[in-house]
Structure formats: C-alpha cells, structure tokens
Amino acid sequence: MEFGLNDTIHDCSPNKQLMTDFDLMMILKSKKNIYRRAGSDIDVAKRNDDQILELLETMQQAAYQDRQLNRANKPATKKIALLKHFLSQLIKKDLQLPLLEHNVLNVLADWISPLPSKALPCLQIREGILKMLGEFPTIEKSYLKQSGIGKAVMYLYKHPDETNANRRRAGELIHGWFRTIYNVNTELKAMSREERQQFEMKQMPANKRKTTDSLPSAGCNQLDEALWLDKRPQEAYTSVTMQIKPESSPIMSSPLKALVEFLRLIYAKCYRKVVRECNQHIVLGISHTQLRGELRARGAAYAVVMISDDASTQPPATNTARSFGFNCCNSPSFVAVTKPAVTASRSMSYAIRRLLRAAMCVFSWFVMPYSQCVSGRIERRKLPPIEDPLLLLSATVLAERIRKREIRSEDVVRAYIQRCQQVNPLLNAIVEDRFEAALEEAQEVDRQLAKGTLGPAEELARNKPLLGLPVSIKESLAVEGMSNTAGRKLREKKVALSDAPVVHQIKRAGGIVLLVSNTPELCLCWETYNQCTGLTRNPYNLQRTAGGSSGGEAALIAAAGSLLGVTTDIAGSSRLPAMFTGVFGHKPSPYVVSPYGHHPSCDDENWGSFFTPGAMCRYAEDLPLLLEAMRDPEGTPVTLHKPVPIGALKCYYMENDGPSGLTRPIDADIVQAIRDVAAHLNAQRVNLKRLRWTLDISVCKMLRMKNVETIYSPQANGKPDTTMKREVFKYLLGMSQSDLPSVMIGPMQHIVNNYIPQSRLDFLDAQTEKLRKDFIDLLGTDGVFIYPGFPNTAHRHYRIFHKLVDTTYMMVFNTVGLPAASCMVGFDREKLPIGVQIVAAPGQDHLIFAVAKELERRFGGWVAPV
C-alpha cells in the first residue's frame, strides 16, 4: 500500500514494523477525517464572519438601548432578552477565537459595566458572562489591554452589592490575567520582599529604573495600564503619582509638592482622623474602606496616601493603589495625590457651600460692628420683679381654678394686663392690644360661671379647656379687628376682617385674646425687627436678641407678660425664640393645626407640611392643653394626653449636624447640656449622615414654594408695588421701606428656580425623602431624638445675619415634617437660657410633651428673669 508524501505515520506507534497493512490503512483514514473536520470548521468560521459581526453589533445596540432606558427611569430589558442566545454562541469552542479577534471583550465589558444610575446590570447577565469568561482559553495580553474588560471585572469584584460567588469568579479572572500580563509562573505571595521588589523593578521601563528625581509622566505599572487606564473616562480621575525609594534611601521625588498637598488636605479637614507615624512614612489613621467612603461622602478634593513598604503591616502598594483606582508607580511605598470623581450634585453642593461661606464672612465684617453699636446703645436694665402670684401659676392650674370659681377670670386677665404695661416699654413686644375688650370678656365669663349656664366643671374641661385664660397671638395670624400687617410698612394699616382658623379654635375653647405681638417683616427673619414696631429685646438681657420670627411672643411669655402664646413655625420660628428666652416652644405635626389665615399666605400644595402654627408657654404641662385647643377638628388626628412611661422610651441624640461644613461649632455649654439630657434619659448616640444636607434641602424646598406672598407679589390691582432691581437699588441707597430679608427673598427665589439644575433639585428631593424615612425608621412610635437648636445662646442684636446657615438645625424638621419642641434645660456662663430640641415621629407629639415634663422636673424649667 502506498502513501503520499504528506501522509506521515511514523509517530503513530513506537513499533510500526509490527503493524499490519490494515492497521496502517485505518490510521491513515482517521488522519484524513481529522484534517477534513478541521478544514470544515475553518471554512465555517470564515463563512460566519458576517454573522459574528452582526451578533456583536446587536449586543452593542442592546447595551446602548439599556443605557437610554435607564436614563429615562424605565426597565432596562434589552440585554437580558438576548442573554440566552448570546451565551449559547460564546460557549462554542470553535467560535471563541474568532470572537476574540472581533473584539468581543469590548462588548462584554460594556454589558457588565454599571448603568448610568450606577446600578449593576442584572444578576443573570453578570453571572453568565463571568462564568463564560472563566471558560475562555488563555487571552492574549493585547486583547486585555485594548478591551477594558479588566476595569469592568474589577468594578464587580470591588462592588459591595456583588454576590460572593461572582466576586470569587471575578477575583480568579483578575488573578489569571495578572499572570498573563506579567508572564508569572509562581505565586507573588510566595515571593520574599526582596524578590517582589526586584520583580516590580523589572517591569518598569528602563528609563525609569535609573532615577526617580522627577515625576513620571506615565508612571503606572503595566497592570494598571491594562486593567484600568486605557478605558477610564477622562473626567473620572485626574491623578499625579510620585515614586519613592525604599526607607534606607532619601526621598528622591518631589517632597515639597507632596508636603504641600498633604498640608492642603489637613487644612481642608477632609477627614477628622488621627495622623500617625509608621516606618518613617506618614499614614492616615484610617482603613482603606473608610478612606474610600470618606472621599465619596465628603467630596474631598484631594487625598494623600503614603503606604508603608512593610509587607507584614500593609498590602503591596500596587494592590492598595489599585483598590482605590489610583494611578501609582511601581514601588512598595508611594505617595498618591488624586482628585476623585465629583458628581454634578457634589460639585453643586461644594460651590454652594463655598459661596455661602464667603457670604457669611462678608456679612460678618459689616454685621459685627453694627451689632456692637446697636446693642451697646441699649441700656441694660432689669425687668420689674413679679409681684402677683397669679403670674406664677400654670395655665392648667389657673383653668381648673377658674372652672371651680376659686379665682376669677377678671383677676387673671387684669394681672397680665398690668404685667404687660410694666415690661413692654423695655421689651417692645406688643403691636396692638385689646385690654379693655379682654376685661369685658373675662367679666362675662365670671358672670356665666356664677349663673351656672356653662355647665359642670368636667364638661367645661372637655369643651372649653381655656375658659377665662388670657392668650396672646402673633400678629401675622389674623385676629378680627386687629393689626395684621406682619411687620410690613404699608400706606394703610391692614386690619384682619375675620379670625384665622387657629384663632377661632382658641376663642371656641374659651381663650381671651389679649394682644397681638411683634414679628419681623413678613416673618422672614430670625431677628424680631421691623420698621413699624421696631426691635424686640430679650427679657434676660436687653442687649440680646429674642430670636424670631415669634420673638414678640417669646419675650412676653418669658417676662410673664403672657400666659399662653399662639405662634407660627416655618423655619424654627417658634423654637428659636423659645430657646433664647427659656420657655417651651412646640412645632406640631403637619396639619394638626390649620395653616390658613396667616399673612404672608401661600397656595402651594406643600405649604401645610412645611408651615404650621405653634404653641408657646412657660410650663411644659401647658403644651398639650394649648395644642388641644388649637387643633383643627378636620386636621390630622393625634393623641395629646396619652400617658407615657419615660423609662419605656427609646432616646437618641446627636451633638451636631456632622460634616456639613457650614454650621459653626456648638458652644461647650450647649454640648454639655445635651450630654446631661442624654445621660438622664439613657439616650443612645447616633449618626444620621444625611443631616449634612439640611441646608441644601431646607432652603431649596422653602424657596421653591409657589405663590408665597412677598413685597414683590401682585397687589389688589394686579401689579406689584415694586420690582427686584428697583428695591435692591433703593435698599443700597437707604431709601427702601423694607428690611434686608424682604428685599433679598425675591432674588433668592429667582436663583433657586432658574439657575439650580433640575438634577440637583431632584437629588435634594430624594435626600429629603430618605432623611424623613431615616427618622421615621429610627424613632417609630416610641422614640425621641435630642438635637441642638442653635450653636449658641442668645447673641447680640442683628448677629443672625452672619449665622443664617445655623438655622438649619431647626429648619430641617419643617422640611421632613416632624414635630419638634424647644425645651429649657439650664443657663450658660453668661446666665442666658439654654434650650435643646426634642423631636419625634409624625403624630407622636405626646412623646415630646412627656419628655418636656421630665426635663422640666429634672432641670427646673423656666426661671423668672431678674
């Protein structure tokens, strides 16, 4: 039998002389079949080039469509629909090489990369592709470098939401690709320290092994180049790397630049972590995971990391740098200076904070001298002492004695009228009084009680809990026949034609309206001042502010000039004055009290959740009594008199708002007061990180309210009295009849509504809902939260203008719609009242009242100013 020249069979058997002709014929036939099959596969691959290109194009189109659907907040389902067919093709061994040649790795990287919303692709997609990649033959270095698949797999490996199985598969892939790139035949873990250093040195380009005096223009190792840098978006990182020689050699790179950047980091206070010395290298006292979280959370501009080359205490520098995404040089110890990715929301937040810091600094240059001058001209006098014992009784006790006819309503009302006449010349808190009408109403109450026409005392306690008690009302709330200008200087005095719903409820409960109290113009400031009535002063120190915008109520109540006060709260307007004057101020849950009948008004659908009338009094036991009388019969139902065992409450606290970067540090006296309260209530310290967004979410929500009445709003004739440009110009010339907050509210609304990106506003709305959920989940139906109300006690007049951002301690609870109260807990070193906020979940106002009573019992509560 003859064979051709190409039919070599001498290797088929070690002893071919013993083989028969039949055996040789069968071997030859088998060889021909093998060649025929191989040739057929090659032909098929050539014929299927177009089909492969079509398949890859379909996959790319599916990935693109999924990204577009994700941006539109729609389900991304295109890739998952193709997954089964795609994997059935990739699993074929004879197609894997052609697919690699057609850059299938680029498509795979696109499929497993995160979506625009930062969400991971479907688990089935990630799992199927990682499994399939593990079954691929050894992939050449060139394919890895140009595809970017390493970056995508590394992202899955590091992602906290990835499954353990997928993370293990990704780790195995990265390890295998590492060995492919470096042609490593032994485990790096088995190498000694010197061997690893020598191995890394060999991988460096020759021109960079000689010297390290200058910064390398592309000082990254080949692994970083293959797995990270080729496909990294340009806007994601801007990195500079510096190589450092081992410890025994002096630092040959740019130590001055490294030092400058490190000092820049410390000055910026990106982290409040301890810096320690370690092996002659500076190391931030923070773990790798914490560092990454701090960079993301704080939006840090720069980070400086110096890794020790001691393998027993630190992982290899390249691995550490890669875990952060740093572009580092090949050295066991290095300095990496990197600028992390900054999203639009974070960059906007950073810009806003820098702008506000600058504004507050500029304001302080003008405010501090002016404040010192105004406050210094006020004579520091003491209030007349309280002589009538009726002024020292709580409303609860007085109401019960009036119903039982132990005392007369006329005597109570007359005592408070006399006290108002004593203290108001010093405080300047009353806009308009109705003393004579109040005395007549009190006399009528006494006559009806004497006749017995009002019913038994028990029935009166239910239906008319405030019978015969004097009540003062904030002037911005409508009281029929009384001033209702809200501190605005008008050509004609505005008089309320009817009662606001909350005032109607007060009168219906038997309360006697005594007066309307002072407020800043349109309630737009935390300093109670306007050009009609003037400046209201603090009864504990006339040179200090009473707060705002309910400063008139707080000053009168603290001076025993009023028994009960009806206030309003839109950004701490009830709680800040109560805190500065040592009384109790409560902001109820939304819609418990009707928000209507207020000037300025608003028809925005969210107005009632942000704004609400509030309650103010000297004694904690009067809070539920007053709120019960104020509540809207058709409003949100709440239980106000439910007994609460203090020991069963879950109490939490924070001493500040965390790393907001704007608010000033809390005074030591207030911090100590919070700790004392927390210790008394066995409170647990918590850290609600979203509180750092309080300024952004609160201000943007408030300024986006539609149709809020301002000095620029249309009047009865359909035209505004003035324009923004005209009023700002008049204010700068000293010719405006409006105050600074009223003038600036229009430009601020214009900026928020026209110049802040919608994406930023959407982000803040999402943070608001998440923060609200955080509070509700934390507090539940049996928890309270202790929190500062302001960084300091009552300051000198007008200094609020360079402390405006500090009001976010109170404003945030209007934004998220939680009830909150300011409770008096002591005095500071200047003998000014200290107050803290008590917060509960919506509808749980009774928990706040129970805690307020306990704090009053423990710390003493209101003390008469002397």
Image: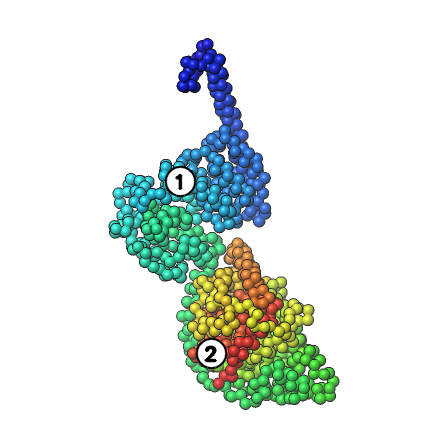
**Residue 494 appears at what percent x and percent y?**
61, 75
Task: Identify the image quadrant of residue 89.
Answer: top right
Regarding mark 2 in the picture, which secondary structure is present there? strand
Mark 1 to mark 2 CA distance (whole Å): 66 Å
Report which quarter residue 84 is drawn in.
top right
Q: How many marks?
A: 2
Q: Residue at x 69, y 78 (%)?
A: 462
Circle 1 crowding by C-alpha within 10 Å: few under 14, some 14–19, many from 20: some
**Residue 143 or 237: which is nearer the viewer?**
143
Colour option used: rainbow
User: Which residue does the image show at 52% across and 67% down from the upper left?
Assistant: 652
Pick the residue in front: 70 or 190. Answer: 190
Q: Is residue 261 visible?
A: yes
Q: Amino acid at mark 1?
A: Phe
Q: Residue 594, relative to residue 190: is it above or below?
A: below
Foreground disc of the pair 1, 2: 1
Image side of residue 338 versus residue 469, left or right: left
| Image vertical order of residue 840 relative to residue 23, above or below | below
At horizontal 62% and vertical 81% (from top left) the residue drawn is 396
Q: Position of residue 538 (x, y in %)?
A: 49, 80
Quadrant of the rendered image containing residue 667: bottom left
Position of residue 702 in the picture relative to residue 295 (left or right): right
Q: Position of residue 58 (x, y in %)?
A: 55, 36
- What amino acid type is highlighted by mark number 2? Phe
Comes first in the chain, label 1 or label 2:
1
Which numbered dot is residue 410? none
Crowding at dot 2, Cα within 10 Å, few <14 / some 14-19 / many 20+, comes out as some
Q: Are marks 1 and 2 in contact (CB under 8 Å)?
A: no
Q: Pointer 1: what residue?
A: 178
Q: Is the residue 823 above or below the residue 439 in the image?
A: above
Residue corresponding to mark 2: 827
